[in-house]
Image (spheres, rainbow, N blue to C red):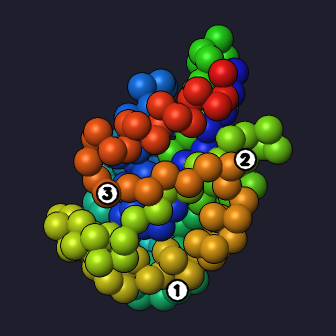
Amino acid sequence: MIRIGILGDIGSGKSFVAKLFGYSVFNADNEVGKLYKKNKKIFIKLNQTLPKYITHFPIKKQEVTKAILANKNNLRKIIKIIHPEIRKKMNIFVKKNRKSRFIVLDIPLLLENKINRKKDILIFIESKKDEILKRLKKRKNFNHKIISRFRKIQLSLDYKKKKSNFIIKNNFTNKFVKKQIKYILKQLY
């Protein structure tokens, strides 16, 4: 099994590209959403750590957003609770798909949390800054401060780009991106 890790800026289209590979995708953001909605233990831990902000189960994203905006240390506290769970879920996903030719890891903090392995194929998604901003503004819960808080805990885009085996230029059209994916998969066979 070849593990493909998708790297890139917030809003660069990592999830969009990950799906176009046509293989099983582990999407960490979706898994976090499920934890907030369904995991009572996570709620209890977050409620004990941030009782002023995390008050109801299921956890609402607005509560998490308020906590992050109130104090930059709150993001680290949340990560400390959430990431071990996400790592467990990823390990289950990897085991479940161990017979697959490829799996795709769509994990925003893949390198930062040292989730990647040496043999992983890293692909950097490159998008124009103005296109990213335009797309981010369309998101329901768009908040510039939140995005900059998340960017501060991430490694630089230049570093991620250097670490990558391939770069996909994303103009957000299926045809253009699929052509690049096809080329990459050919190289990996």
Please give the name of the residue rendered at 49% of the width and 74% of the height, measured from the top-left corner: 150
Q: Position of residue 148 (x, y in %)?
A: 44, 83
| Residue sitting nearer the eye, 74 or 30 | 30
| Residue sitting nearer the eye, 56 or 60 | 60
Label 1 to label 3: alpha-carbon separation: 33 Å
Q: Is residue 52 left or right of residue 130?
A: right
Looking at the image, can residue 21 be seen? yes
Q: Earlier in the sequence, mark 3 or mark 2?
A: 2
Most extreme residue toward the top is 99
Task: Specify the quadrant that holds the C terminus.
Answer: top right
164 w.r.t. 34: above or below:
below
> Mark 3 belongs to which amino acid?
Asn
Q: Nearer the viewer, mark 2 or mark 1?
A: 2
> Mark 1 belongs to which amino acid?
Lys
Please give the name of the residue rendered at 68% of the width and 41% of the height, measured from the top-left corner: 121
What label sits on residue 171 in the rendered view?
3
Say which residue label 2 marks: 116
Say which residue label 1 marks: 72
Q: Secondary structure at mark 1?
A: helix
| Residue sitting nearer the eye, 48 or 99 | 99
Label 3 to label 2: alpha-carbon separation: 26 Å
The reply to whether dot 1 and dot 3 touch (C-beta < 8 Å) is: no
Q: Earlier in the sequence, mark 1 or mark 3?
A: 1
Q: Position of residue 118 (x, y in %)?
A: 82, 44
